[in-house]
Image (cartoon, rainbow, N blue to C red):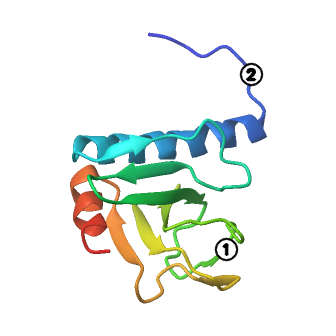
């Protein structure tokens, strides 16, 4: 059985975990037939994924939260960037939320208009179709 012998800094590990959520979301959307585009860099534009069908493109920001409280306050980290949706994954729970990008500085994660999903592709895709 493989064993990771490298020592990884906490900040590097956090970046790895964040990227794993972006890749997981991309896989779920690809499996549903969406075209998924991954920007080479997302600094400034704040776009982690772009998903497309034949007519529309949607810019998505992916965030992870270290909380099991669904009413946690989430902050707008994409001000000045054109984002359509933010997908939040709880790192301590088996759930997440899809939220239309909001203009306010912050709001509760479980605000009206945010759609909850259980962390499984079938549940996420059902939720994604509701937005």
Taking the spot 50% from the left edge, 45% from the top edge, the residue there is 22
Which mark is drawn over residue 103? Answer: none
Q: Secondary structure at mark 1?
A: loop
Report if the CB atoms under discs 2 and 1 are less than 8 Å apart: no
Q: Residues within 10 Å of mark 1 (few under 14, many from 20)?
A: few
Tell me if mark 2 has few (under 14), some (14-19) or many (20+) residues whose alpha carbon lies within 10 angstroms of its own.
few
Which is more toward the observer, 96 or 62?
62
Per the image, label 2 sits on a secondary structure element best described as loop
Residue 94 visible in rendering: no
Which residue carries the number 2 mark? 7
Location of residue 98 in the rendering, given as x and y in whole percent from the top left corner = 42, 69
Label 2 and label 1: CA atoms lie apart by: 33 Å
Give the mark toward the camera: 2 or 1.
Answer: 1
Above-or-below relation of 112 to 83: below
Of residues 1 and 126, the one nearer the viewer is 126
Ranked by sequence position, the earlier of labels 2 and 1 is 2
Residue 104 appears left or right of 26: right
Q: Residue at x 60, y 16 (%)?
A: 4
Q: Give the position of the N terminus as an image quadrant.
A: top left
Task: Please name the residue that numbered disc 1 is placed on.
Answer: 76
Name the image quarter holding residue 101.
Answer: bottom right
Left or right: residue 70 compared with residue 10:
left
| Residue 17 appears in the figure | yes
Counting from the top left corner in percent of width and height, residue 91 is at: 53, 55
The quadrant of the image that shows the C terminus is: bottom left
| Residue 70 horizontal/vertical position (percent) | 49, 77
Q: In front: 9, or 31?
A: 31
Instruction: Determine whether 20 is above or below 95 in the image.
Output: above
Residue at point 36%, 72% (across, down): 116
Residue at (36% x, 75% y) in the render:
115
In the rendered structure, the answer to whether residue 40 lies left or right of residue 96 reads right
Q: Along the line of sight, which residue is nearer the eye, 7 or 64? A: 64
């Amino acid at each position: 059985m493989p064993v990771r012998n490298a020592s990884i800094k906490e900040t590097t590990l956090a970046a790895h975990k964040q990227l794993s959520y972006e890749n997981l979301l991309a896989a779920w959307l690809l499996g549903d037939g969406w075209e998924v585009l991954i920007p080479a860099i997302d600094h400034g534009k704040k776009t982690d994924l772009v998903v497309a069908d034949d007519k529309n493109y949607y810019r998505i920001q992916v965030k992870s939260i270290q909380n099991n409280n669904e009413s946690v306050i989430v902050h707008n980290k994409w001000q000045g960037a054109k984002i359509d949706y933010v997908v939040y994954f709880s790192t301590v729970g088996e759930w997440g939320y899809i939220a239309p990008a909001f203009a306010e500085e912050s709001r509760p994660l479980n605000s009206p208009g945010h759609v909850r999903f259980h962390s499984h592709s079938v549940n996420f895709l059902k939720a994604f179709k509701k937005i």
